[in-house]
Image: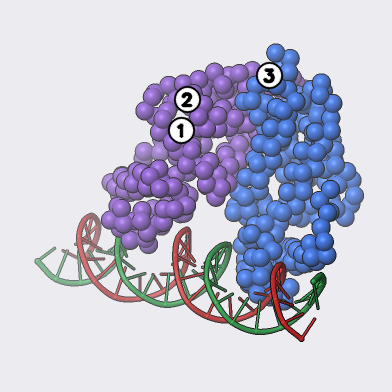
Chain colours: A blue, B purple, C green, D red
Amino acid sequence: MTTGGGLRELSRRAVQSQIAASAEALFIAQGFEETTVDEIAAAVGMSQRSFFRYFASKDDVILDNLERLADDLAAAVAERPDGEPEWDTLRRAFDPLIEQFADRARREHGAAVQRIIEDSPRLLAAYLQRLDGIQQRLTDELMARDEDGDRIVMRAVVGSAFACLHAAISHVACGGDPERFGSHLDRAMTALRPALIPSQR
Amino acid sequence: MTTGGGLRELSRRAVQSQIAASAEALFIAQGFEETTVDEIAAAVGMSQRSFFRYFASKDDVILDNLERLADDLAAAVAERPDGEPEWDTLRRAFDPLIEQFADRARREHGAAVQRIIEDSPRLLAAYLQRLDGIQQRLTDELMARDEDGDRIVMRAVVGSAFACLHAAISHVACGGDPERFGSHLDRAMTALRPALIPSQR
DNA sequence: CAAAACGTTGGCAGTCGCTGACAGAACGGA
DNA sequence: TCCGTTCTGTCAGCGACTGCCAACGTTTTG
């Protein structure tokens, strides 16, 4: 997939991971706003200028994972059969996320990251913006396979599915039992299944 | 309502409106990112320091209107009868927005502002964050009148309704006919009406 | 009417995120 | 070995934003 790079790209990824790890540790220890880019750079032993050569912004250190999520979701949607109701397609696309919450270590790490995000207005804003971008992309993907669909309704359907996702994630991030993430998501998505599916017009 | 202030508060509001008007003109003329706070301050004849005594941030100049929207929505939800399905309550709460789009001048102004917002990633992020806050507030409001409701599902329902709203607004902001805003919203909300209403458990 | 109390304002200096430009070091290939 | 590419640090600067202090005007009080 994306792993088609030379040695340089590999080294770059490694450095990025190192920065992200150090940064996350600092964020967890003292908060996002209270951690300066200089501190992060010093922690990994590089200049502030070099930090910005690996991440476009301080937000990106945490939110970069969302790029991969976006790719995964788009791929999952593309792989589903054409006739399938969009709601089911979206629900299936979320499966990998549920799997992530099945593993204890990854689940708690994810919850910690989410807590960092929701604790900082600045980060939360950037996070929601990325989610919005992902929704746009998925809407395009879904529109491509249903020529005569209604774009506005489709966009709303995708947004609705993400509302379920966001509700479930926020809940487990704010003290809710992370083990029940899947059931939370399913409960929301079952209740919110659209009455009229756009492809049924 | 909120108009219970003395002369000082009145003068403050007037200055705020003046700043907002000047700022919006600059944003429309040369873009949000390209307009500095110093320019805005100079345009209204005050120091940058004073600007920040009226608005907490540059974003706030544009997004402050959302505070009023939040109040209106919360009030509209509170006024609706207890037994009414949440979906209808939310749809009714959006009525004032539709009325706004009925008036030509306000409609075009709203579309212009929305275009400013969606043209700047920074602003869009802040905008989405405020919308998220409003949703949180409406969720609380709705939960208060349905004791044994499911908070996650309720949050998802509110998020779904806002997804419809966002889809309709974005569409009219990006070239869509603003006059059909109401029909766009209705189409989306009719299609997305939840199959299971949380109060029907 | 003068003095005190209060709120508003501007200037200044400083922090923090972020960027462009430059020069030197490290690396790989020819 | 030399050459070009990439990576790196340093420096200088911009823009958003904040804390501090001094000046001013208005209102209240003795």
A94 left or right of B133 in image: right
Residue A43, by quadrant, is bottom right
- Residue occupying the point 47% across, 42% down: B116
Sequence-wise, the earlier of marks 2 and 1 is 1
Q: Of residues A20 and A174, which is closer to you in this image?
A: A20
- Residue occupying the point 78% across, 32% down: A90
Q: CA distance from mark 2 to mark 1?
A: 8 Å
Per the image, the residue denoted by label 2 is B178
Residue B89, by quadrant, is top right
Residue B111's tag is 1
Q: CA distance from mark 3 to mark 1?
A: 27 Å
Q: What kind of residue is marked 2?
A: Pro
The answer to whether tags 3 and 1 share a subunit is: no
* Secondary structure of the residue carrying numbered label 2: helix
Furthest residue toward right: A103
Q: CA distance from mark 3 to mark 2?
A: 22 Å
Per the image, the residue denoted by label 3 is A148
* Secondary structure of the residue carrying numbered label 1: helix
Against D30, residue B198 (above or below) is above
Disc 3, disc 1: CB below 8 Å? no
Disc 2, disc 1: CB below 8 Å? yes
Residue A87 in picture, x, y percent from top left: 77, 26
Q: What kind of residue is marked 1?
A: Ala
Residue B159, by quadrant, is top right
- Residue occupying the point 44% across, 47% down: B31
Query: Is disc 2 surrounded by few (<14), some (14 to 19) or many (20+) residues within 10 Å?
Result: many
Q: Of residues A95 and A104, which is closer to you in this image?
A: A95
The C terminus of chain A - image quarter = top right
